[in-house]
Image (cartoon, grey):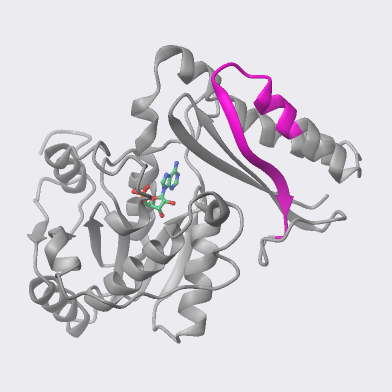
């Protein structure tokens, strides 16, 4: 093995429910702690950080790669979402992933499929308000994945703050026997949060794509500087986005970390959240602000 290579053993790749489930159950029977990282592929360093944390904390790591059609709106980017499968599998090999679950769409959604799960309330705001039906697709596919990959612990990114909040609510409400770990957002050196969608950005748009992280920093700096005028901070966040070329803001606000409601006064912990279109690419970002 060459120096710096973490592993050269290819993961098992499973396409069927039976195969991945029996691999996971066999690992558990051997007393191994199973970690699960659900993804839509087009893996980047953000995904790899989740896998590395799982690798550190677990004995058997499963990654799923499935571009879930039900979480895309009719005019969203489902058909052009990147699917670099060979590169993804090579990264899984490099990270020492034990098993990859790679279901076909018909395996996840046979023609007679008729059930969905929805976390009410939390899925109606922020992303849910701008992407109707999105979170019903997310929670349904994640619940299915948890059934098929009965792991001990699962890893989600803080990057999708509302998503991990909903998954936590679903796991608690439905008494699902899985622990959830939320892992920090991985960023480019200039602050842009890594996303599989960043590949859509032109050179000009890539520059404008710094606006979301700058607007989070603006909020944090103003709060840490003692500013308590939350409406003015929200306006400044929105204005920063709106003043950036190619950027069309969807929202920029300060919310309660659990209820996701907009806060009217400063709390010990709050979350700055932002969503904007940069050209045709929709980006989201957030920052937990604690100890103010
Ligand atoms: P996706 O493939 O976009 O569905 O993302 C799969 C998982 O990776 C989700 O839990 C995301 O929150 C997480 N993730 C995506 N981008 C990042 C990032 N920049 N840093 C950390 N986690 C991320």
Q: Which residues are magenta?
A: 237-256
Asked whether 5 falls inside the magenta stretch, the response is no
Work out which residue is located at the far front of the displayed protein and give it.
Answer: 74
- Depth order, front residue of 249/270: 249
Residue 194 placement (x, y as % from top left): 43, 36
Quadrant location, the N terminus: top left
The picture places residue 107, in percent across and down from the top left corner, at 13, 67
- The x, y position of residue 217, in whole percent, is 70, 33
Judge whether residue 254 is colored magenta: yes
Q: Nearer the viewer, residue 207 or 251?
A: 251
Give the side of residue 7 with respect to residue 246, left or right.
left
Vertical position of residue 117 compared to residue 249: above or below: below
Tell me the residue at 34%/67% (across/down).
142
User: What residue do we see at 79% from left, 31% from top?
Assistant: 236
Judge left or right: residue 210 versus residue 279. right
Q: Establish if 279 lies above or below 28.
A: above
Q: Residue at x 49, y 34 (%)?
A: 187
In the rendered image of this protein, does residue 65 appear above or below residue 252? below
Q: Is residue 47 visible?
A: yes
Which image quadrant for residue 34? bottom left
Q: Residue furthest top?
A: 204
Q: Could you tell me residue 249's position as x and y percent?
A: 61, 33
Q: Nearer the viewer, residue 4 or 184?
A: 184
Residue found at x 35% / y 70%: 140
Q: Quadrant of residue 230?
A: top right
Number of numbered markers: 0
Judge left or right: residue 166 versus residue 148: right
Image vertical order of residue 36 relative to residue 5, above or below? below
User: Can residue 103 be seen?
Assistant: no
Between 280 and 180, the one lying in front of the other is: 280
């Amino acid at each position: 093995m060459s120096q710096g290579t973490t592993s050269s053993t290819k993961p098992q790749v499973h396409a069927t429910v039976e195969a991945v489930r029996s691999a996971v159950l066999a690992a558990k029977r051997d007393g191994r702690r199973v970690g699960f990282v659900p993804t839509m592929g087009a893996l980047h360093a953000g995904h790899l950080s989740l896998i590395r944390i799982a690798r550190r904390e677990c004995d058997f790591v499963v990654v799923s790669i499935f571009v879930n059609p039900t979480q895309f709106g009719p005019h969203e980017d489902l058909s052009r979402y990147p699917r670099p499968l060979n590169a993804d599998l090579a990264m899984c090999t490099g990270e020492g992933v034990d098993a990859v679950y790679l279901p076909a769409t018909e395996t996840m959604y046979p023609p007679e499929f008729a059930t969905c799960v929805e976390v009410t309330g939390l899925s109606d705001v922020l992303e849910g308000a701008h992407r109707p039906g999105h979170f019903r697709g997310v929670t349904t596919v994640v619940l299915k994945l948890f059934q098929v990959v009965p792991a001990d612990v699962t890893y989600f990114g803080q990057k999708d703050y509302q998503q991990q909040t909903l998954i936590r609510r679903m796991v608690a409400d439905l008494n699902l026997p899985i622990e959830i770990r939320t892992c920090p957002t991985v960023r480019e050196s200039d602050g842009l949060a890594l996303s599989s969608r960043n590949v859509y950005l032109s050179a000009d748009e890539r520059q404008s794509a710094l606006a979301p992280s700058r607007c989070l920093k603006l909020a944090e700096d103003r709060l840490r500087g003692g500013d308590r005028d939350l409406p003015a901070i929200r306006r400044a966040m929105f204005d920063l986005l709106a003043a950036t070329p190619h950027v069309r803001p969807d929202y920029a606000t300060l919310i309660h970390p659990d209820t996701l409601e907009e806060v009217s006064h400063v709390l010990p912990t709050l979350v700055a959240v932002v969503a904007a279109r940069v050209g045709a690419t929709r980006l989201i970002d957030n920052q937990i602000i604690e100890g103010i």
